[in-house]
Image (cartoon, helix red, strand yellow):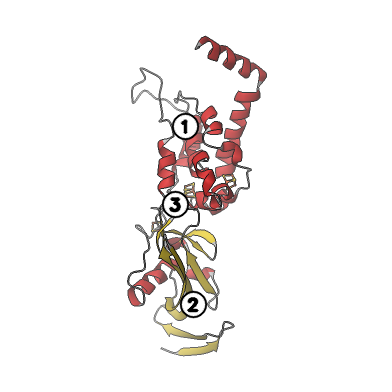
Amino acid sequence: MTAIEDRAPTGRTEVEVEVEGGTSYQGAFRIWRGNASGGALVDFEVEVNEGEVVLDVVFRVQATQAGDLAVRWNCKAGKCGSCSAEINGRPRLMCMTRMDTFGRDETITVTPMRAFPVIRDLVTDVSFNYEKAKEVQAFTPPAGLEPGEYRMQQVDVERGQEFRKCIECFMCQDICHVIRDHEENKPAFAGPRLFIRYAELDMHPYDTVDRRDGLVQEQGLGFCNITKCCTEVCPEHIKITDNAIIPMKERVVDQRYDPLAFLFKRRKDYQEG
Ligand code: SF4
Ligand code: SF4
Ligand code: FES
C-alpha cells in the first residue's frame, strides 16, 4: 500500500491511498442536518473508495461520524426511488451517483429535496404526491368488457409502458419551478409525475373517462410552461414533456378549442342537463 500526499485547492490535505482493487481518498462532504424546525450544513471528511456512489459515502458518515444521520433508501439499485436528494443542488438518486462524477478535491453538498417538507436530515415528506395520486380517477374499461378480452396494438402497449417505468423518486416534482419555491401552488398543481399518469390513462385505448377538464381546472396543466427540467432529471429517461405533457396539452386544446368538438360537448352537456 502506498500513500500519495497532495495539497488540494480547497486547502485540505489530499491523501490518495492505493488499496487492492483501486484507490481511496479523503473526500469532503457537506450534508444538511436538521428537522422541520430548521437546520444547517455540516462538514465531514470521509473516506471514499474507488467505485463507490454517494450513498456509500453517506453510509460511511453514518457509520463512523454521525450515527443518527437520517437517510432513506431501499434497493441501492436505482429502482425503488427512495434515495432522492439534491447533490450539489441538483436532484439525483444517491445510489446511482458515482463518486467519480466529481473531482476528488470537490466538496460534495447533499441536501434534502427542496420541494417537500423535511422530516429529518435527508428525509423528506413526499406525501403530497400520494395525495395528488388519489385525485386521479381510476382506469375505467367499457362496461361488460371482461379481463382477458382486451386486445391492444403493440404501439398502444409501448406508449403506456414508458410511463409505467416511473419509480416514484419524485425528482421531477422537486425540480419543477411551479412548486419548487411555491408551496402555495401545490393544491392546484399535480406536477409532472402525475401528468404522466394522466397521459397513460388518456392514451389507453380501453379507458372511458375524460379527465381533460379536471387536468386543466384542478390539476394545473396550464401552469406548465414546458421547460423540460422534469425530463432532464428523470432517472428512467421518461420523456415527460415530449411524450406526456405536450400531447396532453394538445388533447386539451382539441377538446376546448376545436369548434366542432366544442359544439358536440355543449350539446352533450345540454342534453345531460
Ligand atoms: S416542463 Fe412543466 S412540469 Fe416539467 S418541470 Fe417544466 S414546468 Fe414543471
Ligand atoms: S417520472 Fe421520472 S423523475 Fe418523475 S417520479 Fe417518475 S421516475 Fe422519478
Ligand atoms: S436506494 Fe432505491 S433508488 Fe436508490
CA separation in Å, label 2 and label 3: 26 Å
Residue 111's disc number: none
Percent from the top left, x then y, of residue 87?
51, 64
Could you tell me which residue is drawn at 45 percent across and 46 percent down?
166
Q: Secondary structure at mark 2?
A: strand
Percent from the top left, x then y, of residue 234?
51, 51
- Locate residue 12 relative to residue 246 in the image: left or right: left
Q: Mark 1 or 2 closer to N-term?
A: 2
Beta carbon of the mark 3 residue lies under 8 A of ligand 2: yes
Tag 1: residue type? Leu
Percent from the top left, x then y, of residue 4?
49, 89
Could you tell me which residue is drawn at 46 percent across and 89 percent down?
3
Q: Secondary structure at mark 1?
A: helix
Q: Mark 2 or 3 closer to N-term?
A: 2
Quarter of the rendered image showing ligand 3: bottom left
Q: Secondary structure at mark 3?
A: loop
Percent from the top left, x then y, of residue 44?
44, 77
Q: Which residue is mark 2?
A: 28
Q: Residues within 10 Å of mark 1 (few under 14, many from 20)?
A: many
- Against 96, is 135 above or below? above
CA separation in Å, label 1 and label 2: 46 Å
Q: Which residue is mark 3?
A: 169
Residue 201's disc number: 1
